[in-house]
Image (spheres, helix red, strand yellow):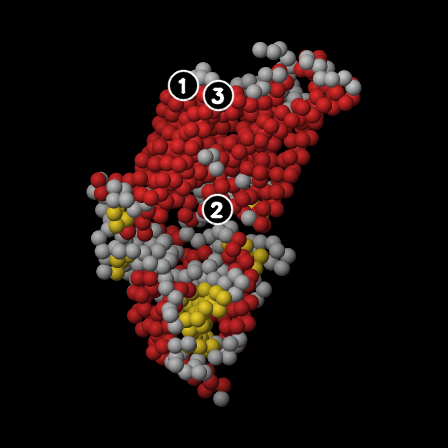
Amino acid sequence: MKQGMTLPKTHGTVVDYRKDIDGLRAIAVLAVFFFHLYPVLLPGGFLGVDVFFVISGYLITSIILRENARGVFSFKRFYARRVKRIFPALFVVLILSSLLAFFLLAPETYLNFVNSARDASAQFSNFFFARKVGYFEENLASQPLLHTWSLGVEEQFYLFWPLLIYFCFRFVKLQRKKISGQPFPENFNKIVKEDTCCQRRMYRFFFIVFLLLAVLSYVLCVLFIDMDRQKAFYMFYTRAWEFCIGGCVSLPIFPSIKRKDLGALVGGTGLFLLGFSFHAVDQNFLGISFLQFGALLPCLGAALLMYANCQLSIGNRLLATVLPAGIGKISYSLYLYHWPVIIFYKIFNNNHEITPSAALIIISVSFVLAFLSYIFIEQPVRKLETGDNFILGCALVVMIVFSTGFSHLKRYERASWRGADYPNKTDNPPLQIPTSCVPNIKDHFVSLECKVSGKKEAPVIALVGDSHAPHYLSALVSWASHNGYDVLFLGVAGCPMLLGDVKIESLITVEHEVQCSQALPFFAAEIVTHPRVTTILMAQRFDLFHNGKGYLSVDRKIFFKNKEGRRIENHTEYYRDRFADTVRQIRKAGKEPVILQQVPLFNSVSACTWEPRLKKILSQTRDCDYDEQFFEKWQRQSIDFLNEFAALHHIPVFDPFLCMTDPLNNNINMYRDIDHLNEYGSQFLTSCFSDALDTIMSDIKKNTTSRSQSVQ
């Protein structure tokens, strides 16, 4: 082996093993773990992943710099070490998760699983989830491999980072040749070692490169927040700035900490920033996305802790104690196992809530699996003396075999060995557009005109709302055809039907914002002012719009924005005011508003329609009842809000709870997902809704007549 320059001591310690960094890993993985268990108690716990990115940037940069400076760096050796570190434990988790998925997941969830497993095998699961699901969305509970997105980000970072540092070294050599006018000396590393001035210039150059890259990545991240939030969260190029922070700290250009009080201050500040960010930052911080500022706090905290002198900082000494350092050693396996354990527990028990006793079981199982993985998988593989070519060849074969295998497993979505539909459950048809309705296609939405009265100038009843409005369309068209009305329909997913200068920001999908910006002016111009419209029925996902959160979410997913484009903080008050103003404008235009409440939330659709093989073997009963606790937690508040609002403004209300006392009709499921009906459910509503609408329209006519007489 060549002798050459070694990296000097960095901030009071060498770049070799540091127990306090393992302790920092422990803080990061436990923060993520407890966030996934109880997000309300630790709303910023997901930022532990950002801490991992900073740690990776620090350690990987240290290793690459040291080996390049010694002249012994090898790309093959580097990637072989990464494979030995990442692949064995990951692919064991994929195998174990697949065994449970085969016999426990419903068809649609199974299909998502095998697709995510395919991409996780190829180290690209972050691309899959960027297309499919937001990290904070309601349906993340059906994604057992969601956490592998961060592994994809790291692996992609590892692809280009060594190349960057290598070419930086080449550039330094070229510059030295240009200045001296001499060819490369073979003992360049020895010259650098003996020339401290050259060392300083070289590492300052690296610092400038890392800093510029960090700024570029951060700017991309901020830009993508408005253009594509999923990419801003999941892509390695929008997260590279976090690795760059770790890389900057690894450079020996900062003065070493030699005073005890300064070490305590630096380490203490780092711990404070971590604690503050885990408790005070959620997906929205200071009215903006956490990626714009909130993510900086834990990254800086981690950087300060790695910069602090382990001997002088009491915070670092605490992290280096036996328990934190021990948890840090198994942190990778703990991260891999904790999320599938949580998700498969929820799926098996048909329960989104985790009781304290269940949390204790989940924690125990996760730690046991992580410890076994560390002892019997991670450690033995790391100690293997197999050649780098063999390791990389095996990695390529494994990636191809697993990716191809998971692609082929998609065909078994509804295989009999996986499970079967419950009796009398034939299919889950989507809502159908009545054949009498003619679509009016716009750029980003579609309205419907249903001329069913048989008259040329018949009065019109309008149905407006979001994706919940179609629940009532068939029933309304049927009622209108028997009562001499035509129907106008406008249903735009994710859009609160409000009048005035209303702008939204949706974390669910940016498409909601685009559609809504086009649909709301249409609502005002083509429906509210329509001369033949007499009544406007409003069907919305009120559990989402009234507080911006909806079910299974502790943070807001939809925001209203002011004229300057800033988020309105007092969401519920603003919504109430805009809703009241909408009612006033509708009445001013001579129409009468009617509120159609949401159907009951049903959180056991998969458990009700599909019997997995594992549940059949264990004789687990079919779960097809409304969950009263789920309803009280996630829907009661919006219903109380609506009832109070309707009473205050004297608005008729149709309550589907009066007729939907069971999610099954003749043993057939009526739900497409937790909050949407399928065609069976929509048909079931017809009779109940028609009777209620007879009464509502009769009352409206009486009230209208009474008001006219009082005016006269």
- Give the mark nearest the N terminus, 1 or 3: 1
- Which numbered disc flags the more N-terminal residue, 2 or 1? 2
**In this picture, residue 163 sits left or right of residue 101:** right
Q: How much space separates mark 3 and mark 2, taking CA atoms?
A: 34 Å
Q: Is residue 77 left or right of residue 616?
A: right
- Determine which residue is flagged by label 1: 380
The quadrant the N terminus occupies is top right
Q: Which mark is residue 389?
A: 3
Q: Quick one: 303 or 394, which is closer to the camera?
A: 394
Q: From the viewer's perspective, is the residue at label 2 or at label 1 nearer?
A: 2
Instruction: Give the image quarter of residue 38.
Output: top left
Residue 90: mark: none
> Where residue 131 is drawn, which disc sits there?
2
Q: Is residue 646 left or right of residue 603?
A: right
Amino acid type, residue under disc 3 in the picture: Asn
Residue at the (30%, 46%) spot, across then down: 414
Q: Hey, what amino acid is under mark 2?
A: Arg
Say which element carries label 2: helix
Amino acid carrying label 1: it is Pro
The local crowd at label 2, few if under 14, some if 14 to 19, many if 20 or more residues have their Cα within 10 Å, is few
Disc 2 from disc 1: Cα separation = 36 Å
> Where is 587 relative to 358, above or below?
below
> For this rendering, which residue is in front, 423 or 278?
423
